[in-house]
């Protein structure tokens, strides 16, 4: 029996299934093998038996290996992330400027779950699951607007802006029913820098201010907020890669930019690239190319670029008069969507064609990244790859992201 341990299956779930068989059949023999004991102990400590351990979570970047490839391919890992990472984190929902007066509301799908945020009659910001308590239809189908109540279009159940159930017909004879128990289920909501974010877990949420920590001040200094900005465009990309692959690509400290984004790199002084790490975010910045150098990508406007990553899935990019917001969400273990929202500085009067040229330049960069990310996903599925290494001088933000993921998955 012990000899068979040397050919244990590769995946975490297969390993644990095999371990259980060994320990059931020969518990004493199994525990004498240090490999079996160590693997079993580490998996059960996570509380998520399908998540393969990452022993380098506390290693210095010079010695650390990246998380195993199963973190990017396993359905079980995605389920663990949805149950932990995306439940306890503050997630972007929409623009706070659309929530000003009593009755104002916005709706959004966040990790494919429907939510609605509104200003109630007392002027308080509220957010709820956009799910009727009767048969689960959305109580509000519009993206934004102003209303006095939420009326489910399916069977007409009506909810106040405070979430309370106000009206439900055809319930004569129903038993064990209290309207006070059937209100919309609330979630935590707050705003920062013109962004509205929600936290959807059942546990008491850390405040948004504490979530951002000192990184919030760093973003303000870099001009990353929606103050004085106007929305001009939206795009959505559907990628054949794990959502974390897109994040990793964003967090390599500009490592790939000179190789993969030559037009973008032509407008940046890459040797000025810096990264700073904060509690749950990182900020990367890079100075512009000299004014005497002609570059195809004119979006910088002679100003530095700043790129903020707010854990787990929000990216905020400020360059010249532009700010664009990227939100990546998993749609499967090896697929994701990335939503782009583009904002332009109020009062900025671009030359004719500037807007279109800038959006085309952004599209070029995104298509280059799509190609890279999808190629990486194919490599992650190959038996030729399991773990990689970090470039110590630039990939600190990526390691920081992986450490935060590991911390959440352990709890």
Image: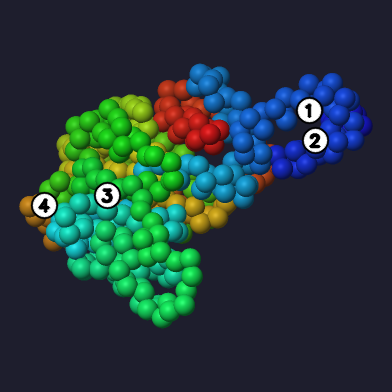
Give the labeled residue for mark 1. Answer: 36
Residue 376 visible (yes or no):
no
Rendering coords of residue 354 (x, y %):
18, 57
Q: Which residue is mark 3?
A: 196
Q: Residue 215's quadrant in the figure?
A: top left
The image quadrant that residue 389 belongs to is top right
In which quadrant of the rendered image does the N terminus lie? top right
Residue 186 spot, x, y in % from top left: 35, 53
Q: Which residue is pictured at 53% across the width and 21% down the height?
A: 58
Mark 3 or mark 4, earlier in chain: 3
Q: Which comes before the other along the chain, label 2 or label 4?
A: 2
- Is residue 219 visible in the rendered structure shown here? yes
* Residue receiving disc 2: 19
Give 142 or 169, whichever is nearer the viewer.
Answer: 169
Q: Position of residue 286 (x, y in %)?
A: 28, 32
Identify the element where label 2 is drawn. helix
Secondary structure, mark 1, is: helix
Q: Secondary structure at mark 3?
A: strand
**Would you call the spot at circle 2 few (<14 residues within 10 Å), some (14-19), or many (20 or more)?**
many
Number of the front mark, 2 or 4: 2
**Residue positioned 80% across, 35% down in the render:** 19
The structure residue drawn at horizontal position 86% and vertical position 36%, both measured from the top left corner, is 24
- Could you tell me how far apart the alpha carbons at marks 3 and 1 are, in whole angstroms? 47 Å
- In front: mark 3 or mark 4? 3
Q: Earlier in the sequence, mark 1 or mark 2?
A: 2
Circles 1 and 2, Cβ within 8 Å, touching? The answer is: yes
**Does 316 sit above or below residue 141?**
above
Which is more N-terminal, label 1 or label 3? 1
Q: Which residue is mark 4?
A: 346
Residue 156 position, x and y percent, is 35, 77
Query: Marks 3 and 2, how far apart in space?
Result: 46 Å
């Amino acid at each position: 029996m012990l000899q068979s341990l040397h050919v244990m299956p590769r995946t975490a779930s297969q390993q644990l299934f095999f371990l259980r068989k060994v320990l059931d059949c020969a518990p004493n023999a199994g525990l004498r093998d240090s490999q079996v004991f160590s693997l079993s102990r580490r998996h059960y400590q996570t509380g998520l038996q399908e998540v393969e351990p990452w022993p380098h979570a506390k290693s210095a970047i010079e010695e650390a290996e990246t998380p195993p490839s199963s973190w990017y391919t396993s359905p079980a890992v995605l389920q663990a992330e949805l149950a932990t990472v995306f439940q306890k984190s503050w997630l972007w929902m929409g623009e706070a400027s659309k929530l000003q007066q009593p009755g104002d509301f916005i709706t959004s799908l966040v990790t494919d779950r429907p939510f609605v945020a509104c200003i109630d009659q007392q002027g308080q910001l509220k957010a709820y699951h956009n799910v009727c308590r009767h048969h689960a239809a959305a109580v509000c189908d519009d993206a934004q607007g102003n209303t006095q109540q939420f009326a489910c279009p399916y069977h007409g159940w009506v909810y106040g802006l405070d979430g309370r159930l106000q009206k439900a017909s055809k319930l004569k004879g129903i038993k064990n029913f209290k309207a006070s128990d059937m209100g919309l289920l609330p979630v935590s909501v707050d705003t920062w820098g013109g962004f509205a974010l929600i936290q959807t877990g059942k546990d008491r949420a850390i405040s948004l201010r504490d979530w951002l920590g000192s990184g919030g001040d760093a973003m303000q200094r870099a001009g990353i907020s929606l103050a004085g900005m106007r929305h001009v465009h939206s795009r959505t990309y559907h990628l054949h890669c794990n959502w974390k692959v897109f994040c990793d690509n964003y967090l390599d400290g500009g490592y790939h930019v000179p190789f993969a984004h030559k037009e973008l790199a032509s407008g940046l002084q890459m040797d000025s690239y810096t990264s700073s790490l904060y509690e749950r975010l990182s900020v990367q910045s890079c100075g512009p190319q000299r004014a005497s150098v002609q570059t195809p990508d004119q979006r910088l406007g002679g100003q530095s670029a700043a790129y903020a990553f707010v854990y787990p899935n929000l990216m905020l990019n400020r360059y010249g008069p532009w700010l664009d917001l990227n939100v990546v969400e998993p749609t499967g273990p090896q697929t994701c969507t990335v939503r782009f929202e583009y904002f332009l500085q109020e009062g900025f009067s671009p030359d004719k064609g500037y807007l279109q040229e800038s959006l085309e330049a952004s599209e070029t960069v995104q298509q280059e990244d799509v190609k890279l990310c999808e190629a990486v996903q194919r490599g992650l599925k190959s038996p030729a790859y399991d773990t990689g290494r970090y470039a110590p001088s630039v990939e600190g933000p990526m390691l920081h992201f992986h450490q935060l993921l590991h911390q959440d998955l352990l709890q």
